Image (cartoon, rainbow, N blue to C red):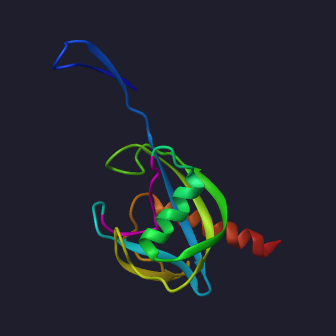
Amino acid sequence: MKKSITCPHCSRRIDIWDNPKPVVDVIIEMVDGIILIKRKNPPYGWAIPGGFVDYGEMVEVAAVREAKEETCLDVSNLRQFHVYSDPRRDERVHTISTVFIANGEGVPKAADDAVEIGVYTAEDLPDDLAFDHADILSDYFESKKAKVKR
């Protein structure tokens, strides 16, 4: 969406484009389940590790960076899962998330935007999931079931 503002110094009209913000989320698989973090900042709740893609950064690089920043884990076997773009997925701003799946390596530790960290399965997910992460995790666990049935 294009917005126009007037420069306070020269009075010229300046067009500003307000587009959705790219984000990444990483479903980190461990031996006993997947990693979730409890968010330090609003919106609060448990979340898949992730965050905003920096300008000039590839989404794959952002996924690895965000995983490391929030969980202290290295990730391997990074693969794209789905893209989620509902404008209501984040109450702060319209985001488009590229969701990845990866294998976690190391000892999980909450860091950066995370105040707590845990390993969860489909059967014991927390009730207070942030954003649209309940939908994403539902899709993820359904895809795991479908692969087992093959």
Vertical order, 61 against 93 (above or below): below
In percent of the image, x 45 and y 58: which residue is there? 132
On whether residue 141 falls in the magenta region, the answer is no
Vertical order, 59 against 9 (above or below): below
Q: Indicate the position of residue 110 as horizontal and vertical percent values.
A: 39, 78
In percent of the image, x 46 and y 44: which residue is there? 55
Residue 31: which quarter of the image?
A: bottom right
Residue closer to the observer: 1 or 67: 67
Residue 2: which quarter of the image?
A: top left
Vertical order, 5 against 138 (above or below): above
**Left or right of 131 in this view: 146:** right
Q: Quadrant of the N terminus?
A: top left
Q: Indicate the position of residue 149 as horizontal and vertical percent values.
A: 79, 74
Q: Indicate the position of residue 127 as horizontal and vertical percent values.
A: 39, 74
Q: Which residues are magenta?
A: 44-54
**Left or right of 39 in this view: 95:** right
Q: Indicate the position of residue 144 as horizontal and vertical percent values.
A: 69, 71
In percent of the image, x 49 and y 71: which residue is there? 68
On whether residue 52 falls in the magenta region, the answer is yes
